[in-house]
Amino acid sequence: MKVAANTLRKGHVVEYNNKLWIVMENELRSPGKGAAVAQVVMRDIVAGNKMDIRFATQDMVERVRIDEEELQFLFANGDEYTFMNTQNYEQVTLAKDIIGDQAAFLQDGMLCKAQVNDGKVLSIELPETVTMKIVEADPVVKGQTASSSYKPAVLENGVRVLVPPHIEAGIRIVVRTADATYLERAKD
């Protein structure tokens, strides 16, 4: 089905130049003069090449129908991640570039949503939040106010996040997987 270029979102699959592309980013830009444009970063599903394209906002693009399946994360082996389809129990191995930076938040048994076209996994969507333990946190700087300042901390998976001053090492927190930001202290 044809859709306007300015309605594309991350994860959408489009057909462009007789190839399937997955949208990685879409930013609407309004220059001082002229019409607004949609700056779209896409990755070729087959070859893996990235392309940066500028569409006029009214340009129409062919969006491809994709199916959604639930996959359970099993294990990682280097830059390859193995999942199991929860419906038919088939195992699927995916490269890290399909998952992206969110791969650091994968946990054993985690259920993820996969976008599939003709039996091929195009992208993986992790749960919106994940609970993780802080293993290292900087000490509070004297004079910091609790409401406006954050300090760096390291999660059990090695990802650095900014947390409020009252969060110390050993505390479990809820983190947004999309951008690795602190949401709240875990309630467990």
Image (cartoon, rainbow, N blue to C red):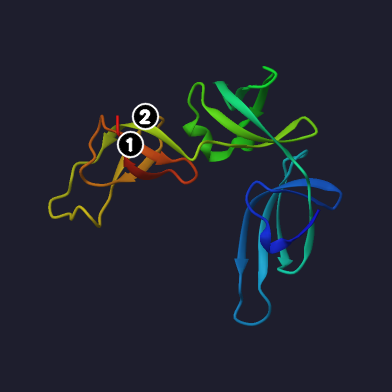
Label whose residue precedes the other's in the sequence (1 or 2)? 2
Residue occupying the far bottom of the picture: 33
Q: Can residue 77 be seen in this view?
A: no
Residue occupying the far left of the picture: 142
Residue at position x 27%, y 50% from top?
Answer: 150
Residue at position x 48%, y 26% from top?
Answer: 107
How far from the left and from the top, in percent, is residue 152?
30, 44
- Label of residue 187 in the image: none
Tell me where residue 55 sits by quadrant. Answer: bottom right
Residue at position x 26%, y 32% from top?
Answer: 171
**Circle 1: residue type:** Ile
Crowding near the residue tagged with mark 1, few <14, some 14–19, many ≥20 C-alpha atoms within 10 Å: many
Where 37 sits versus 26, above or below?
A: below
Residue occupying the far top of the picture: 89
How far from the left and from the top, in percent, is residue 43?
70, 46
Q: Mark 1 points at which residue?
A: 173
Q: Mark 2 points at which residue?
A: 156
Residue at disc 1, secondary structure: strand
Tell me where residue 92 sits by quadrant. Answer: top right
How far from the left and from the top, in percent, is residue 44?
75, 44
Residue at disc 2, secondary structure: loop
